[in-house]
Amino acid sequence: MLSEKPDKVLFGCVCLPGFAYSLMAYLASNTGFRAISTGLAAYVVASCCLGWDGMRALAPSESKGLRRAVTGAAAVSLALAVGVTGFMRMEPLIRPDVPTKRSVRIAQGPAEGLRVPPEEANRHQAVYATFRQYAMGPGNLIITRLAPWAYMVSPMRCGAPTTWRLRLTRTGCANT
């Protein structure tokens, strides 16, 4: 920061932890931007405060155009941070399908009792039956994005660095 007295506490206690949290949550989760949005919300708010402080230190009080531009950018950033985070929290609650499509109750496995559409129930049952048949021995097991819940069906150990967001590439496995 270029001001004479940078706010090291705000940067060190809010900006860096917010960014680090969002990065770690992204690497450890299969929810992509939903995981990042929680940490970035704190990061954006702190960044706006630091930007405002820098603008006050660098710009004379007569520079109304710069103040308006920085104020507008900060307001848009804060509105986006709050809006996107709110949408990411509410979007899973708003399902595009109507509840009547979730007409089949899963009979066995980790999702037992959940109501889902018939095609999803059939897919769950097929994966469950396959794992009960072929993944019951000793050793390691790697499951890609197919069904991370399938690790709960098998006694085999997870053979990947994480149970989430693993995909196969031409050169090997990648955590995405």
Image (tube, rainbow, N blue to C red):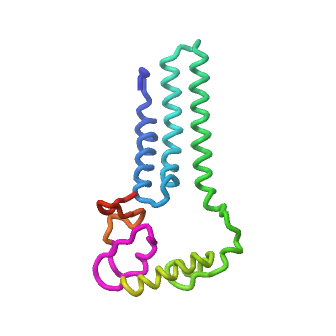
* Up/down of 80 relative to 155, above or below: above
Instruction: Tell me which segment is drawn in magenta.
Output: 136-158
Q: Where is residue 94 in the image (x, y as percent from the top left)?
A: 66, 61
Q: Quadrant of residue 3?
A: top left
Identify the residue at image location x=34%, y=59%.
174
Compare residues 130 and 63 and report the one nearer the observer: 130
Q: Does the magenta stretch include residue 38?
A: no
* Up/down of 21 relative to 61, above or below: below
Q: What main secondary structure does the magenta stretch of the protein show?
A: loop
Q: Residue furthest bottom?
A: 133
Q: Residue furthest front?
A: 170
Say how many tags the image has. 0
Compare residues 57 and 94 and report the one nearer the observer: 94
Quadrant into which the N terminus falls:
top left
Q: Where is residue 64 in the image (x, y as percent from the top left)?
A: 61, 16
Q: Position of residue 8 (x, y in %)?
A: 41, 32
Compare residues 98 and 59 and report the one nearer the observer: 98
Identify the residue at image location x=71%, y=74%.
100
Answer with left or right where residue 70 lies relative to residue 17.
Answer: right
